[in-house]
Amino acid sequence: MTITRRVPLVAPLWISAYLALRVYWAATGTPGGLSPVESDLVAFTGWGAAVLCAVAAVAGFILLSTDLDGVPRRLLLGTAWAASLALVASSALLLLDVIGAVFPGLGIEFYPLGALSRAACAGGGVLLGLLTLAYQRRKGRRAPVVYTRTPPWAYVAAYVSVTGCVVRIAAQAVVGFGESPLATGSALLFEAAFLLAGTVLPLSLAHRWGRIWPFWIPALRGRPVPRRLVLWPAVGVAAGITVYFGLMLLQMFWERLHGRNPFPPDGDMALPETFFWVAVPAYWVWGAGLAAAALAYARRTRTAVPETTARVGSTTGTNGSTSAVTS
């Protein structure tokens, strides 16, 4: 059994351990100073977080039980996927934790205990998602999809992602770069990483040089690019941006529907509301496009499944052989 198959098996145990912490905090009071908004999680807090973890743990244990075929499969899968997404969404502030830890000079305060809690919550969601996916493949007897070439929609997704990043920069240029709250400290290093994640990373997921080192890198040219070097940062950035700014966008709609300015000016930042209505959707488009391109890259670089294994979307010829998936 490979490591990728063993890792999801710890999902219900991981979530159960985190459940114990959530119950303790809900009963005794959540410690203060866990995030800029006090609570360590968003959407699900207090006993709500404990209930969510309980549902996720139960779903995980059921998914591991191969002898429970009487359980309604659609209900089980729907519950597991919903719980997985809710755990990841509730840890949306983890994006700020990562930025604050990697770029300490930006002025984004780092909350160690809150960051650990959010990392545990997000980790449980990811593990549950992997376990659910493994269950679907096992019950459906379907092999993973493998692309023999990059599909056209992956190119579109990559360039849509870059467009989101460019629009975000353009919005900042309109109000002035001096108005950014990240204009001091480690700003130069952060901006370099920002540009790489918004341009080079999405394009590397679609173009050949993201799989084979290009000619202008003498020591490595022609050699395969390590899959994890491209895929893991892409998945991390896509998940962080999509979840964080997706929730922020929903909050903005909620506040505006109630006649309130989602971002009232304060002493630290006095930007026009229009800026946020351009920048936040641009961030989300950046993340969503990056996620789609990463999915295509994962399928494009996945190790091919043996011919004898059933494949999603495969076709059988007159001689009974199974053809590879192409898109």
Image (spheres, grey):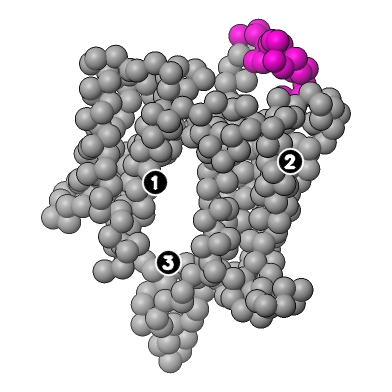
Split into 4 quadrants, where in the image is the N terminus? bottom left
Split into 4 quadrants, where in the image is the C terminus? bottom right
**Mark 1 nearby-residue class (10 Å; few <14, some 14–19, many ≥20):** some
On the question of residue 40 being in view, the answer is: yes
Q: Magenta stretch? A: 258-277
Q: Which mark is residue 126?
A: 1
Q: Which residue is mark 3?
A: 144
Residue 285 quadrant: top right
Q: Amino acid at mark 2?
A: Leu
Residue at left offset 25%, top offset 50%: 10
State the residue in front, 295 or 189: 189
**How many angstroms separate mark 3 from mark 2 (CA)?**
41 Å
**How many angstroms separate mark 2 from mark 1 (CA)?**
32 Å
Left or right for 253, reference 98:
right
Q: Which residue is mark 2?
A: 188
Residue 263 quadrant: top right
